[in-house]
Image (tube, rainbow, N blue to C red):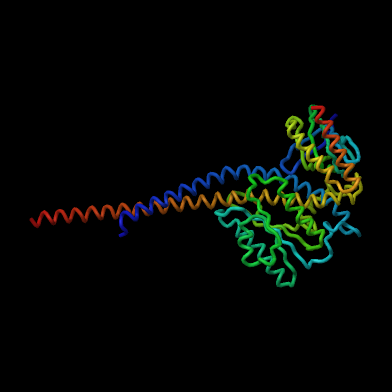
Amino acid sequence: MANLKELKDRIASVTATQKITRAMQMVAAAKLRRAQEAALAARPYSERMNQVLSNLANGNASAEGAPKLLAGTGKDATHLLVVATSERGLCGGFNSSIVKIAREKAVSLMSAGKTVKILCVGKKGHDVLKRQYSQQIVDLVELRGVKNVGFVNALEIGSKVLEMFEAGEFDVCTLYFAEFKSVIEQIPTALQLIPAQISSDNKAEASAPNTSGACYEYEPEENEILEVLLPRNVNVQIFRALLENSASEQGARMSAMDSATRNAGEMIEKLTLTYNRSRQAKITTELIEIISGAEAL
Amino acid sequence: MAQLLKFELVSPERLLRSGEVQEVIVPGSEGEFTVLPMHAPVLSTLKTGVIRFKDEGGAEFRVFVRGGFAEVVDNGLIILAETAIPMEELDQDRLSQEIRNSQEDVADAEDDETRAKAQQALDHLQQLQASL
């Protein structure tokens, strides 16, 4: 039986930890609401963007001289993986699940003899990836001081990516982030940014009667619009990924801290039980000692 | 007017408006144009300016936009704005901020064409500030 003082200290320390995890859970819950609103508010924009783009692309992607951002460079020798993770830890499997799918991709690309470059967004992913891929990491964008992700942050990353693309440093760019489904479910997602990927359901939508056959008048010229639209699309997708990520991070943290709080509660219960038992046992022993001492007289 | 136009105005930060309207006046980069129900499909870029639209009841709304796209498809208008601020929320501070941005754009412009565009945006902003 552990001694009483030790047990008491244990209980006190677990209680303190529980207080912290509970506070973190509540902070995450409050932040989650805001992040979730922002993520949901950004969804229509990127969805419409995709729709507009797919309408455009259907008529343009195969055409000769289509912009490289849409049609690709024609090679896929060098891949850029943009891995967006969080700045802080203690959020369950959030970072590791994003890093995991990015790493799987990197491994399969490298074994196929392709060159891999990694752009890290967020410190946590960088910490993990640099152990294995310090050669491949080209840059790290930290969002440490950023409270609410704004479009400027996405722009910063987007312009880096576009600059590299224009300099011919990579052929295919894929973005990794966690899509926010619910507090308990975040889905690590890979999204191909360059060449622009028109997802299959958008294609289906585009071919549906309500939007198909739309023969646009372009103002200004089609190519001019594409020139503006395509880089914009990259930025918008990054922005959306950042927002989804921040909502997912808070969600993951909230559920992680919730279970931590619950575990701490269970632990305190068990420790208190042991503590009371040993206290009782001690009293009983003392009583027996006193009684047998009295009898001996 | 029985026929209405499906109108969506979204900025990266939020969905500003989604619903049916009577008409929308869009500041296209090649000139302002009005979109009425049954408009032909158009895809246009936007310049800095003010979008004006009338809702079902005929009440007029004004939204400040900076850059973006307007797409008209199948009796619907989708505006993807880079920045969109309802006029009621637009105040001097915000506007001066935009003006400063524009001035930087003018200073940073590398060729005449972009400079002309940036200058145009700046002029528009200054007009707007004067009218506020």
Image-based side of A131 in relation to A116, left or right? left
Q: Is B129 drawn above or below residue A173 in the view shown? A: above
What residue sits 74% from the left and 29% below the top?
A: B88
Q: Is B113 drawn above or below residue A186 in the view shown? A: above
Residue found at the very far left of the displayed protein? A297
Image-based side of B6 in relation to A32, left or right? right
Q: Percent x, y for residue B122?
A: 84, 37
Residues B30 and B25: in front is: B30
What residue sits 87% from the left and 36% below the top?
A: B35
Residue A166, quarter of picture? bottom right
Image-based side of B90 in relation to A219, left or right? left
What residue sits 61% from the left and 57% below the top?
A: A124
Residue B34, quarter of picture? top right
Residues B37 and A41: in front is: A41
Q: Percent x, y for residue A101?
A: 65, 62
Q: Percent x, y for residue B28?
A: 87, 39
Residues A131 and B104: in front is: B104
